[in-house]
Amino acid sequence: DQQVKQNSPSLSVQEGRISILNCDYTNSMFDYFLWYKKYPAEGPTFLISISSIKDKNEDGRFTVFLNKSAKHLSLHIVPSQPGDSAVYFCAANGHNFNKFYFGSGTKLNVKP
Amino acid sequence: DSGVTQTPKHLITATGQRVTLRCSPRSGDLSVYWYQQSLDQGLQFLIQYYNGEERAKGNILERFSAQQFPDLHSELNLSSLELGDSALYFCASSRTSGRPGELFFGEGSRLTVL
């Protein structure tokens, strides 16, 4: 039962342009969402998070948007850089959950 | 460097065998989580421990077991291995149990079952 879905396995973007990665969830009890970035041969690293009391959180080039009614969140990277090329996972958590649910990841390729 | 240490980094074994993966959490973190990432799959939650006690269980097979020791390191035991158990196994740690702000992942243990 995939409660967090990333429907795009891959995304290719030109350097300097915007990258938009999408994530959908099914469980309305989720109230905390995170994005992780993973380089090959490394573990995932935390990138940015958002609580359900907000609809936007910004950290430098990274902005996460949350649309609770649509059960959808997105990660915007502006401007995209070649070093951003990685697999991005979204994850969700809720008050009654002791675990995070992860999506299957989106592989971002930023072309120079 | 996340501060989470996993050993071994790579492991090749045969079907039917048993292996143990080890994880040392970040200093001060009481919660340890185990995740499995099969080829082109997302991170599948296996099990969580908090301060030595099992807190949550995911899609962990009966052939798999885990424990967290008094020094807070954790081991994931995989037995009667099958080809389909080949995967990356990640350990993650966090400060708390109920509402972790974020998880800190190790680099993973890549298991290949031949």
Image: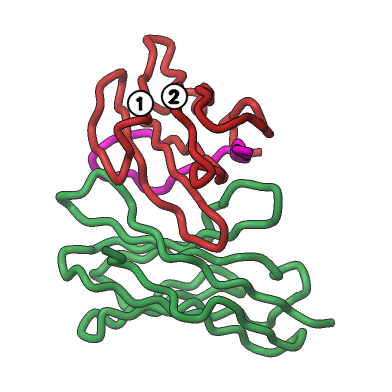
Chain colours: A green, B red
Helix, strand or loop at label 1? It is: strand
The magenta stretch spans which residues? B94-114
Name, please, the residue furthest toward the top: B70
Q: Quadrant of the N terminus of chain B?
A: top right
Q: Quadrant of the C terminus of chain B?
A: top right
* Residue plotted at (16% across, 64% down): A29
Total numbered labels: 2
The subunit carrying tag 1 is B
Image spot of residue A97 (x, y percent): 20, 49
Mark 2 crowd level (few <14, some 14–19, many ≥20, 10 Å Cα): some
Image spot of residue B72 (x, y percent): 41, 17
Q: Which mark is residue B65?
A: 1
* Residue plotted at (48% across, 32% down): B81
Q: Which residue is mark 2?
A: B77
Asked if the magenta segment contains residue A42, the reply would be no
Amino acid at the residue labelled 1? Ser
Q: Is the residue under label 1 in contact with that under label 2 (CB below 8 Å)?
A: yes
Image spot of residue A102 (x, y percent): 39, 59
Q: Quadrant of residue A86?
A: bottom right
* Residue plotted at (39% across, 61% down): A91
The subunit carrying tag 2 is B
